[in-house]
Image (cartoon, coloured by chain):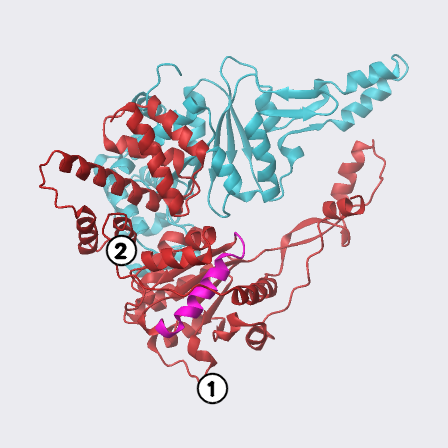
Chain colours: A red, B cyan
Amino acid sequence: MLEEDFLFFVAEVADRLREYGVKCGTSETIDAYRALSLVRMERVEDLKNVMKLCMIKRLEDYEIFDRVFEDLTTTRRQKTERRQGETGGDGDGGQRTLQRSRESGKDSRQAMMAYYSPVEILSKKDLPVPSLEFIRESRRVMKRLRRRLALLPGRRYEKSLKGVVDFGETIRQSLRNYGEVMRVLRMRRKLTRCKLVAIFDVSGSMDTYTEFLMQSMYSLARQSVAVEVFVFSTKLLRVSSLLKYFGPKKAADLISRDVNIWGSGTRIGSCLLNFIDKYRGMVGRGTVLIIVSDGWDTGEPELLDRAMRSLKGMVGRLIWVNPHADKPGFKPRTIGMETALPYVDILAGINALKSIKGFTSYFGMSFQPMTRRMQPVSRRGLRAHP
Amino acid sequence: MLNDLTPEKLVEAMERELYVADKPLALSVYLSLKLEKPLLIEGEPGCGKTEVAKVLAKLLNTDLIRLQCYEGITASQALYEWDYPRQLINIRLLEDRKTPEEISEEIFSQKYLLKRPLLATLLHEGPNPPVLLIDEIDRSDEEFEGFLLEFLAEFQVTIPELGTISAKKKPVVIITSNRTREVGDGLRRRCLYLYVTYPSPEKERRILSLKVPQLSPKMADEVVAFVQKLRQINELNKKPGISETIDWANALNVLGAAELNPSIIESTLSCLIKNEDDLRIVRDSGIF
């Protein structure tokens, strides 16, 4: 590749990364280009390593980069081959990539990448675009949920206007005034902020709830940085970045394109184990895990049992949202539900996430409500002198 | 050393310092030196993140300055503080000999500054820039991370009484994180990023042969195979890292074990697994 080629290549990769919600700005592109001139390239692998190092800033994006890179280098090679007239130029390179990725049973992301080819056929499912009212309502619900679920005051203290006297800090501050205590500082227990991780079941049996799934996924992901959203049926996919960085329409579009697994069978157990294996760093004692599924499982219940037991030990609270739980006379009879129930803190219906009323009926008495947090000290000061 | 450096040479040099670096790691360290950008290393505990900085300091023949982050760390604990008690004593001592102006000049000089790691980095004297290790950034609060952004961008600090102090030479910065909290986008953007994970069997054997040379090759093979098998158990709360493998190999060596058998594994398992629940899981799994 020539030097100029490198520049185009870097720009092209950056462009595609952005399309998948990877934050890759101009400074990353410049870094990558500068780095390429510093390292002697012997193999494609070197090129890939250098670019990855400079352009990708989080583990979750590694996968996307690998696909983008692989796709770009293969199409490039195919293009050259075709130009040389050696392959006979049948013009369906993308089709072949897609076929190959499906045959090898690899991640559906690879199939998604193949979508970049001129051929536009995929089992594309039209997902509904979340409505504005729903987003607003569910934002209210989520806010309440997070406040309600905030774990108890932690071991640490923070500065505060009320609370017990912080003798240590008061004396330390007084040293600045040469031992004269000007102000008595106070502190109180820091609240552990809770983090939400939601895993949605998008298998065939949940088909009737597609609209609800899409809507709550979108509004959940949009809450704040401390929310992660996953979907699963036969395999697990992380969709937070897709939902977070695109508008509702584009996100629905991308997900329907991405998620070839939409509407297929369910393997809850192995998907949850996969989650534990790959993303365990994301959850901790301060995490609330929400699993949205009806519990129809075609996998082995032992796997689900194992996964639920591990998850129970890893997260602060476990909520299972079952769409059928709203119906009168509901009993958790599916195998998945029966296996998971002993580990679940709360079993709720989808109304719990849909409206404040539903929320109160499910979560009303379940947890100790937390008091609203006080304004930080510094902000108060600012407000007094605008 | 910096001028004719290549990633390959770096791998060799690090190996001389008993650190086995693979291609991506060497490349990242090399580029962070060349591009003068901080390097953010994330990964499982015990996979040699902190070690990178230590080895690098030795290689560059310079000092390692370490800032260990913890919950509640504040700017003054990382940057500087006036030594108030000493200032007070000196005011008393100088009271009748000097004028107030002279006294204030005296007590607000660098002599009375307690240099915390970040300021120490800026004031570092020596032919080579120091290596600044900001360890476990994920343990600090978001506010502190925001404060670091500013420092990393300019490498300068303003002390109202003294003026602005900036680094004579840009320090080499290594930041590590265990992912207990997501590090913010702002900090990520300013760094090169590398994720390190558990090593391959070949790499782990190589590490053992460097770090525990007394261990017989056959034994090393068995140790590595067993540890790799342990890492396959997904339910473990904390899988053993490289440092645990080295500890274990050392323990086996001290005990003079000639081969791995269930009884010796049972008695030394606590080197690898440090959690009661995990110990139970491993025992139940029947891998030994």
List the residue tagged with mark 2. Answer: B287
List the residue tagged with mark 1. Answer: A328
Residue A244 visible: yes
Check residue B115 for magenta coloring: no
The quarter of the picture where the C terminus of chain A appears is top right
**Could you tell me the amino acid type at mark 2?**
Ile
Q: Image quadrant of residue B256? A: top left
Q: Secondary structure at mark 2?
A: loop
Q: Image quadrant of residue A23? A: top left
Magenta range: A207-225
Q: What is the crowding at mark 1: few (fewer than 14 residues within 10 Å), some, or many (at least 20)?
A: few
Picture coordinates of residue B110 (x, y %)? Answer: 70, 19
Instruction: Please name the residue shown 17% across and 50% down the image.
Output: A96
| Between A157 and A11, the one nearer to me in the picture | A11
Disc number lying in front (2 or 1): 1
Instruction: Please name the residue shown 18% across and 53% down the image.
Output: A99
